[in-house]
Image (tube, helix red, strand yellow):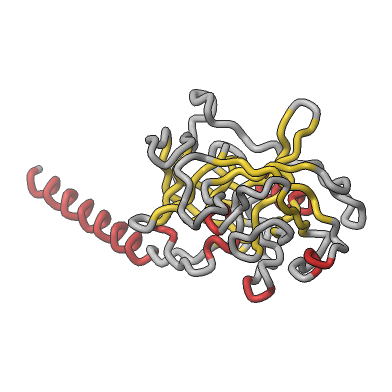
Amino acid sequence: MIVSIRIYDHGHICSGTILSDLFILTAAHCFNQIDDHGNIEIFAGMDSFSSIALSKRKIHKIYIHENYSYNENYFHDIAIIQVDQPFELNNQPIFSRACLPNRYIITNEYLSKDSKLIVVGWKSSIINNDMSNILQQISVKLIHNQNVSCLKLIQNTSYQFCAGLIQNIKVPCQGDSGGPIFIYKNTHWEQVGIVSYGDGCSVSGYPKVYTKLSAYVDWINKFFNDTSFPVRPLTTPSTNGSLKYQLNMILFKIIIFIIFILIN
C-alpha cells in the first residue's frame, strides 16, 4: 500500500499510497521544486530500503489540486500520480489499495477528540534526521482544531487537521510527506489524511498538519470517473524529446517505403 517516491540519483523524497493499479495518492508539495517528472520513480512492494522493490514505475502524469499553492502553507496539499504501467495488484498480495473515508459535510466534525491514529513512513526518527531503513509506524492523536499550537499552523479546519505524539520516540519528518495517516475502523485501517507539513522533525507538543481526505473524496472520485475534470497537470519538459522521437519514426517509415518501392 505504501510506496516510495524517488528522484533518480537523489533517492527518496516522499511517500504515497496506492489507490488503484494506475494511481498513487500523495501530497502536492512533493513536486514544488520539480519541473521534470521524467526522473521520478515509484518503488512499491517493499518494507525496507535495503529490500528489492517488487515493482518500479515511471510517471505518466501528475495531477495537482487546482487550488493548491505552496505560497499559502500548502493549502489543498493533495496530488494524484498516474504511473506509466499498471501495478499487478491481483498477482501481488503485498499490494493493497488504500481505504478512503466517506465524504462528509464540510461543517461537520471529522474525527472525534483524541482519536488515536497511526502514521506510516520511513523518515520517522526523533533520534536523528537519518532515513530509517525499515518502514515505521508512529502512534499520534488528534489535536483539537482550536488548540493554540494547532491554530498557529493550520490554514483551514475544514480541509486540514492536526495530530501530535502519543509516544515521544518517533515523529513524521520531511521524508514522510505525502504518506498516510490511518484510523482503525472496526475491521480495517482507513486512510484519513496525508502528511502535509509541520515544524521539521518536531517533538512532543508540536503538532503536524495533515490534509483531511474526507474533504477531497469528491475530487478523487471525479478523477476516476472523468479525467477531464479541472486539475493542474505538472509540466512535462520532455515533450521536445517525444516530438523528436515521433519525427524520427516518420522519417524512418518514409525511408523504408522508398526502399520497398525501389526493390519492387
Furthest residue toward left: 263
118 relative to 90 in the view: left or right? right
Residue 38's quadrant in the figure?
A: bottom left
Q: Nearer the viewer, residue 135 or 66?
A: 135
- On the image, the x and y values in percent for residue 52 come to 37, 35
User: Which quadrant: the N terminus?
Assistant: top right
Position of residue 183 relative to residue 165, above or below, is above
Q: Nearer the viewer, residue 166 or 114?
A: 166
- Residue found 74% across the figure and 50% down from its top: 213
Furthest residue toward right: 108
The answer to whether residue 50 shows anywhere in this view is yes
- On the image, the x and y values in percent for residue 33 come to 49, 69
- Residue found 24% across the figure and 58% down from its top: 248
- On the image, the x and y values in percent for residue 214 come to 78, 49
Total residue callouts: 0
- Residue found 15% across the figure and 52% down from its top: 258
